[in-house]
Image (tube, rainbow, N blue to C red):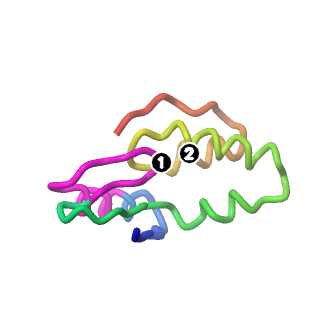
């Protein structure tokens, strides 16, 4: 069993991520395990819209950015990848 937390902005992502991962462990692509061993994915709500965009190149870029995420999502990074304004970084954490 796992849970998803859909967040409206980076502040909300940070809030839920920091509280849920405390005593637990981070995982890739916004996933984490809390102190009780439950799995969560903390994601920006707009990420779903990005993945459903009819422009396949935008979807490819945002998917690559998501797969490169080694912890908490960076909403600005996902937006930049989606718009093609910068390439995803190797940000960790």
In the image, is 75 to the left or to the right of 26? right
**The residue stretch that appears in magenta:** 14-33
Q: Is 59 within the magenta? A: no
Q: Residue at x 29, y 57 (%)?
A: 33
Q: Nearer the viewer, residue 89 or 38?
A: 38
Query: Label 1: which residue?
Result: 29
Spatial separation of the CA atoms under disc 1 and disc 2: 6 Å
Figure quadrant of the N terminus: bottom left
Q: Secondary structure at mark 2?
A: helix
Q: Nearer the viewer, residue 2 or 60?
A: 2
Q: Secondary structure at mark 1?
A: loop
The total number of labels drawn is 2
Q: Is 17 within the magenta? A: yes
Q: Are marks 1 and 2 in contact (CB under 8 Å)?
A: yes
Q: Residue at x 24, y 62 (%)?
A: 37
Report which quarter residue 16 is drawn in: bottom left
**Counting residues from the N terminus, which is met first, the one under dot 1 or under dot 2?**
1
Mark number displayed over residue 66: 2
């Amino acid at each position: 069993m796992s849970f998803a937390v859909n967040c409206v902005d980076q502040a909300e992502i940070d809030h839920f991520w920091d509280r849920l991962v405390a005593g637990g462990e981070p995982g890739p692509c916004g996933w984490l395990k809390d102190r009780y061993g439950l799995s969560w994915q903390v994601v920006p709500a707009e990420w779903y819209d990005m993945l459903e965009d009819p422009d396949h190149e935008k979807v490819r870029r945002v998917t690559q950015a998501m797969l490169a995420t080694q912890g908490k999502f960076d909403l600005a990074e996902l937006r930049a990848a989606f718009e093609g304004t910068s390439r995803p970084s190797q940000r960790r954490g």
